[in-house]
Image (cartoon, helix red, strand yellow):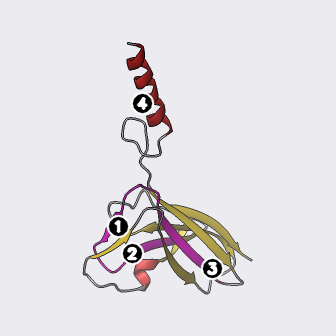
Amino acid sequence: MKKLVSVLSLLVFIFAVSPVANAYGFWAGTIEPSIELGVTENDVDVTYTIKNQTPYVYDISFHSGQMIEYELYKDGALVERYSDLYMFDASMHTITLIQAEEKSFDFTIQDLEPGDYELNVWLHSEALIYQTTLSESFTIE
């Protein structure tokens, strides 16, 4: 009986500190987004990065050539949407990220008027839209 209690205690400890877990309170990692902004006089350079923080190889599917989406707001009003500026092919695309691998998307939003802005960026994959959405505020002087 003492051995059984020791083994069970050890298993509880292992699952409690393990980075891999399940829906019963433990986590298995996520696709983690991050964003960096470089604000210049009238432009903002954006680097949107996703990182595979799961212990698995992760395939991300896209229903078109569009891999990211952004919306730019000034004083609460939408002033620019990425998908309104470009056309994309209609073919399926997939990117594969191994554990801890990153994929970055760089773009520049140009010719902004002075003011306060909010930028919302996300991965344009139906399975990951909510998980990968980030918002960042910035000011053009």
Q: Residue at x 37, y 78 (%)?
A: 66
Viewer-proximal residue, 141 or 93?
93
Label 2 CA crowd tier, 10 Å (few <14, some 14–19, many 20+): some
Label 1 CA crowd tier, 10 Å (few <14, some 14–19, many 20+): many
Q: CA distance from mark 4 to mark 3?
A: 50 Å
Quarter where residue 99 is shown: bottom left
Q: Which mark is residue 67?
A: 2
Question: Three-letter amino acid code at disc 3?
Answer: Val
Within the magenta stretch, is there residue 69?
yes
Q: Which mark is residue 11?
A: 4
Q: Is residue 71 left or right of residue 35?
A: left
The single residue placed furthest to the front in the displayed view is: 3
Of badges 4 and 1, the one in the foreground is 4
Q: Which mark is residue 125?
A: 1
Question: Three-letter amino acid code at disc 1?
Answer: Ser
Query: Is mark 2 in CB contact (under 8 Å) with mark 1?
Result: yes
Q: Residue at x 35, y 63 (%)?
A: 58
Q: Which mark is residue 44?
A: 3
Residue 87 spot, x, y in % from top left: 35, 86
The single residue placed furthest to the left in the displayed view is: 91
Residue numbers of the magenta segment: 43-71
Of badges 4 and 3, the one in the foreground is 4
Q: Secondary structure at mark 1?
A: loop
Residue 107 spot, x, y in % from top left: 53, 81
Residue 20 spot, x, y in % from top left: 42, 46
Decide whether the magenta segment is chiefly helix, strand or loop: strand
Q: CA distance from mark 2 to mark 3?
A: 20 Å
Q: Residue at x 63, y 65 (%)?
A: 137
Label 4 CA crowd tier, 10 Å (few <14, some 14–19, many 20+): few
